Amino acid sequence: AQKVTQTQTSISVMEKTTVTMDCVYETQDSSYFLFWYKQTASGEIVFLIRQDSYKKENATVGHYSLNFQKPKSSIGLIITATQIEDSAVYFCAMREGWTQVVGQLTFGSGTRLQVYA
Amino acid sequence: AQTIHQWPVAEIKAVGSPLSLGCTIKGKSSPNLYWYWQATGGTLQQLFYSITVGQVESVVQLNLSASRPKDDQFILSTEKLLLSHSGFYLCAWSPGQGYSGNTLYFGEGSRLIVV
């Protein structure tokens, strides 16, 4: 069964610094997809970045990048030059390549990021 | 650009009363549509998905039902609310047609408090 674990409950950083959020996953599939989402204070869930398991290069979008360590089943999210508005809850999620349930993402428990001035 | 809109934004309902939540997606034809539920402070759990009009699959049983009356509309409902139905309901979409790795995009959510 697939499982996604985020061990960091809460992180607090000063703005303009770099933060890394950890995520480890478990799957029996050789093909899978990893996602990071951000949940804002209003509750809205925003897609940030993804990594497909067959891609060796780490994904980068704006000031978000991933540290994909496949042998360790780890997909860390790195946010550089953090801003106050990056304060939110960040969810790691995974979908196995051959799931019979369309669109089923397994989410981690989330990491709350607080960025202060 | 695609937009997804959910309604209502928030509801306070009595136990045993009916509920209807909806979402509409614009700018994308034949999307896959999903309902997710999030308990306060919790993670997200998929409830239903639909890959075409009139077809809805249930993922978990929570005494809720869903329908897709139009290509761009997804409705979540129940005739009798339970206290356990309280939480945050999110509608999501992804491009249809095959590729299992398509990204899901979420609406702004509907917050439900059952009293």
Image: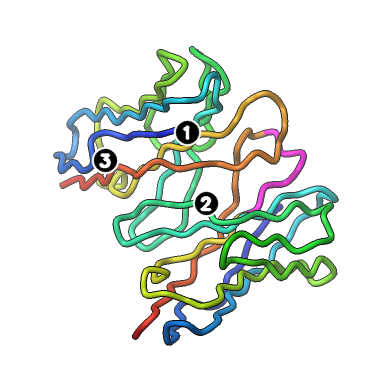
Task: Estimate the x, y position of residue A61 in percent, counting from the top left.
Answer: 61, 59
Q: Front-most of B110 and B80? A: B110
Look at label 1 and name its amino acid.
Answer: Ala
In percent of the image, x 42 and y 87: which residue is there? A14
In percent of the image, x 63 and y 33: which residue is there? A102
Q: To which chain does the residue with label 1 belong? A: B
| Left or right, B97 with reference to A72 | left
Q: Which residue is mark 2?
A: A47
Q: To which chain does the residue with label 3 belong? A: B
> Where residue B1 is drawn, which disc sits there?
1
Tell me, yes or no, whether the two marked residues, 2 and 1, touch with CB atoms within 8 Å. no
**What's the magenta region?**
A94-100
Q: To which chain does the residue with label 2 belong? A: A
Q: Earlier in the sequence, mark 1 or mark 3?
A: 1
What is the C-alpha distance between the residues marked 2 and 1?
15 Å
Q: Which residue is mark 3?
A: B82
Q: Nearer the viewer, mark 2 or mark 1?
A: 1
